[in-house]
Amino acid sequence: MGTRELEQFLTYLAVKGRVASSTQNQALSAILFMYKEVLNIELPWLNDMTRAKRPEKIPVVFSKNEIQKLFANLDGTYWTMAHLLYGAGLRLMECLRLRVKDVDFDMNQITVRDGKGKKDRVTMLPEIVKIHLQQHLDKVRIVHKQDLADGYGEVYLPYALERKYPQASREWGWQYVFPSGNRSRDPRSNKIRRHHINEQSLQRMVKKAIRKSKLIKPGSCHTLRHSFATHLLESGYDIRTVQELLGHKDVRTTMIYTHVLNKGGQGVISPSDQLMVN
């Protein structure tokens, strides 16, 4: 098949098959791979096909009352981590990959390194978690010292930092804020290291807390980040400020949260409710 037939097939997926945009993209990637790597044929870019549209969905957001119920069913380290998702607007992996050196208790801020889009940003450190986080880090430091005494204590370093700074992987500042309970073998270097907590453990605990709280909304860890942005806008913060805290490249991405401005005490009053007032 040539370009025309492939365009017709991909258009068929979008128009007749009504597949999601991700499904069409996966089919396109598979075709390009097969032609280039298997058949050794370079295909021109397929410009004349109809693209499947990504649906624009309003994010699930918990109310402040629902957030309080959720946190009432979390404790310990998972309570602290969940507060960083909600109180600082961190993504799940941004929270898990936090290093000790990037938490500034004096300035009340967290530096997110190499976030989505390979960008760094600064966000707030919630006052409510400071004492809990300091106590948590005191325990983590004891574990790290024991690891060093046992001949371990290394942590993965990004990019070529390990070659440039051979001893940095053992330094306290580079350790993960939320390390795993067990040491494991790093498949990249074959060294025994202590990685960060597995993301599934936090996801399971948040899901469990949602069920125990009897919340009807289908929430997840990312719902806490959605709620962070929405509640800031509800409180009157500028959308550009919220954009920077979230690390969005384009303000249009942040504007999806402005749906909250059309409801609640600060929003538009329904014509039905105006009849009651008049």
Image (spheres, rainbow, N blue to C red):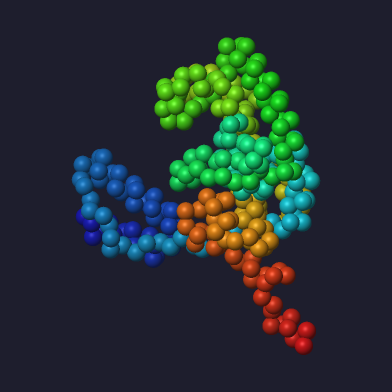
The image shows residue 206, relative to residue 251, as above or below, that is above
User: How many numbered discs?
Assistant: 0
183 over 278 or under it: above or below: above
Q: Is residue 16 above or below residue 169?
A: below
Kindly tell me whether residue 110 is visible in this rendering: yes
Q: Is residue 148 above or below residue 256?
A: above
Task: Point out the image quarter for the C terminus.
Answer: bottom right
> Which residue is at the far bottom?
278
Quadrant into which the N terminus falls = bottom left
State the residue in front, 33 or 103: 103
- Does any portion of residue 193 appear in the rendered image? no
Is residue 94 toward the left or the right of residue 37 in the image?
A: right
Lateral position of residue 103 relative to residue 253, left or right: right
x then y, percent, for residue 244: 54, 52
Image quarter of residue 19: bottom left
Residue 93 lies, in percent from the top left, at 56, 40
Residue 162 picture location, percent across and down: 45, 23
On screen, residue 136 versus residue 113, left or right, reads right
The residue sitting at the front extreme is 106
Residue at 46 percent of width and 60 percent of height = 54
- Nearest the viewer among 272 and 255 is 255
> Which residue is at 68% across, 61% downward?
235
**Residue pictured at 64% horizontal, 71% vertical:** 262
Closer to the camera in the image, 30 or 217: 217
Please report the residue visible at 58 percent of the width from the left and 31 percent of the height from the top. 101
Quarter of the image where one finds residue 137: top right
